Amino acid sequence: MSKADISRPLHLLLSLSSFSVAIVFYLACIDIPFVQICDFAFKQFVKILTLLSIAFALAVFCLWRVKVTANTFDTGEITRIRPIEHIAMPTYLGLFVISLEIVELDVWLATSILIILFTFWRRFEKVFYFNPIWSLFGYRFYEIETLSGNTMTLITKKSGLRHKEDFDDLRRINDYTFMEVKL
């Protein structure tokens, strides 16, 4: 890990935050014994609201930690920019389908599958840390190519980017991912 990278615990938090929506889908579909409220519909509503609140809080905390922890960075001359949400969303939809399908399995087996999926997610997802909750906050995910030929992921609230853009507060998450954080 280079000196400019953020800490390992924050990498883990970013991965967990992006994976948390799949966990919410799974937990929303199973019965959680400690939630004991009379009306079933109200119980489900409270459970889903609580789970989504935790996922949102984790996403906000990660944004704040990137702002505080990551070093600023200048991308250099950008030669190409293109949105990449269409690349990440099919993976996410597949993850949601898996989360919904494993509900029928034994809880321990389902948990094992989620842990294995998270391990793979963590290993391969480090490249751009796609998080659908950040999309709700207005963040967009772009693939950028610099004049030197490097291809990176840029996470920013700007939309409709052109080749020549100025980024005010660009933070380096890893060698492949940069984020313009505005809280």
Image (spheres, helix red, strand yellow):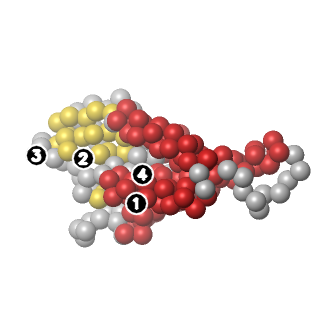
Residue located at (19% from left, 41% from top): 145
Helix, strand, or loop for circle 2?
strand
| Mark 3 vs mark 2, CA separation in Å | 12 Å
Q: Amino acid at mark 4?
A: Val
**Residue 173, image quadrant:** bottom left
| Mark 1 vs mark 3, CA separation in Å | 33 Å
Q: Amino acid at mark 2?
A: Met
Query: Considering only order in the chain, which callout, 2 or 4, is on the residue closer to the N terminus?
Result: 2
Q: Which residue is mark 3?
A: 148
Please report contact status of discs 1 and 2: CB closer than 8 Å, yes or no.
no
Placement of 24 over or under 5, stated as above or below: above
Instruction: Please rate how many residues cluster around mark 4, counting C-alpha atoms within 10 Å: few if below 14, some from 14 to 19, many from 20.
Output: some
The answer to whether residue 149 of the structure is visible from this angle is yes
Q: Position of residue 86 (x, y in %)?
A: 37, 32
| Mark 4 vs mark 3, CA separation in Å | 24 Å
| Mark 1 vs mark 2, CA separation in Å | 23 Å
Residue at far left of view = 148
Question: Which-is-in-front pick, marks 1 and 2?
Answer: 1
Query: Considering only order in the chain, which callout, 3 or 4, is on the residue closer to the N terminus?
Result: 3
Q: Which residue is mark 2?
A: 152
Quarter the N terminus occupies:
bottom left
Query: Considering only order in the chain, which callout, 3 or 1, is on the residue closer to the N terminus?
Result: 1
| Mark 1 vs mark 4, CA separation in Å | 27 Å
Please report contact status of discs 4 and 3: CB closer than 8 Å, yes or no.
no
Residue located at (37% from left, 45% from top): 155
Q: Which mark is residue 181?
A: 4
Q: Which residue is mark 1?
A: 119
Please report contact status of discs 3 and 2: CB closer than 8 Å, yes or no.
no
Helix, strand, or loop for circle 3?
loop
Question: Which-is-in-front pick, marks 3 and 2?
Answer: 2
Q: Position of residue 33 (x, y in %)?
A: 76, 59
Q: Amino acid at mark 3?
A: Ser
